[in-house]
Amino acid sequence: MKRILTIQDISCVGKCSLTVALPIISACGVETSVLPTAVLSTHTAFSSFTFRDLTDDIKNISNEFTKQNISFDALYTGYLGSFKQLELVSDLFNKFKTKDNFILVDPVMADHGRLYKGFDKNFANSMANLCKLADIIVPNLTEASFMLDEPYIEKDYDENYIKSLLKRLTALGCKKALLTGVSFNENQLGVYGYDSIFDEYFYYHRKKLPVNFHGTGDVFASALCGALTIGKTLKQAVKIAVDYTVECINETVKNPNANWYGVEFEKAIPYLINTIK
Ligand code: PXL
């Protein structure tokens, strides 16, 4: 069985990071090892939360993995809370990267033109450095703009603009970049991808829905990671992950009492299992 290591926080309530990655990657039929970087009572979009920093454990845990001869078919990072964590994770990448596995970095730090609580421009620069070590990165438009020192453009951009961002993202050092939340008109929303090895662009989009939910980026990245790990091509994995994310949103809007803080991804897990077969 394939095994991945995902490195991100546990937000006890909030449907993001590890509480999303674990069930979704498991549903893809992939063993999901975790390296929790922090424990929060909820994610940071809540008005208050606790934050137990686990930075000091990262090195000891990864040293034990080495001692026990544990290897991974993919290394996948999401929300990372500090400069020190970025540094430790880049050491870990250097230790566990092989010629047969891949590194997926989701540079979680911003959305809708704004950085999440606790992050600043310098953090975005350091995250861009971590992206250099990745095979695939999956920023949204806001994260890409911060990492490239570009003003955030919300809409009315064209395809050439998106392609130039993608080219510059891969110029950081990663081979493939996927920009999420790309929309050229009111009816479509999707993921624009660029594979720098084949110099190939692609756009996979669905109908734009008039809603916005927290945590959909984590759902997308987790399904993408699972699909890639079991051997799907980049384009196949993007389609699986986008379609699953749309399914999660559709399930959530059906429920008038759905929580504001995340999508009902659990209800769409049977759909994911069926489509990934
Ligand atoms: O969904 C990304 C995410 C993950 N982890 C924490 C967060 C967020 C986004 O706000 O706050 C702790």
Image: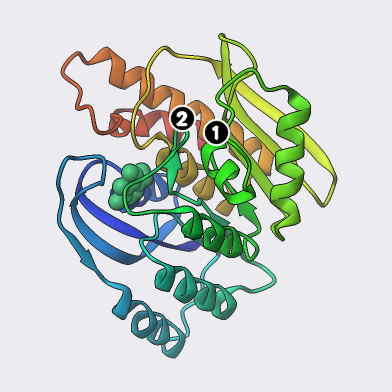
For residue 20, say whether it is visible.
no
From the viewer's perspective, tell me whether residue 12 is left or right of residue 104. left
| Image marks 1 and 2: residues in contact by CB distance under 8 Å | yes
Badge 1 is on which residue? 240
Q: Considering depth in this image, is 166 or 275 the residue closer to the camera?
A: 166
Q: Quadrant of residue 38?
A: bottom left
Decide: is 170 above or below 102.
above
Q: Say which mark, if any, is on residue 244.
A: 2
* Residue at left offset 53%, top offset 72%: 90
* Residue at left offset 59%, top offset 31%: 239
Task: Looking at this view, name the residue that lies furthest to the right.
Answer: 199
For residue 169, say whether it is visible.
yes
* Residue at left offset 47%, top offset 68%: 86
Q: Quadrant of residue 264?
A: top left
At label 2, counting other C-alpha atoms closer than 10 Å, the crowd grade (few under 14, some 14-19, many 20 or more) is: many
Tag 2: residue type?
Answer: Tyr
Measured from the top left, where is residue 142 in percent x and y? 52, 38
Decide: is 254 above or below 47.
above
Decide: is 277 above or below 135.
above
* Residue at left offset 45%, top offset 23%: 246
Measured from the top left, where is residue 39 in percent x and y? 22, 61
Visual colour scheme: rainbow
Measured from the top left, where is residue 199 in percent x and y? 85, 44
Tag 1: residue type?
Answer: Ile
Is the residue marked 1 within 8 Å of ligand 1, measured from its CB? no
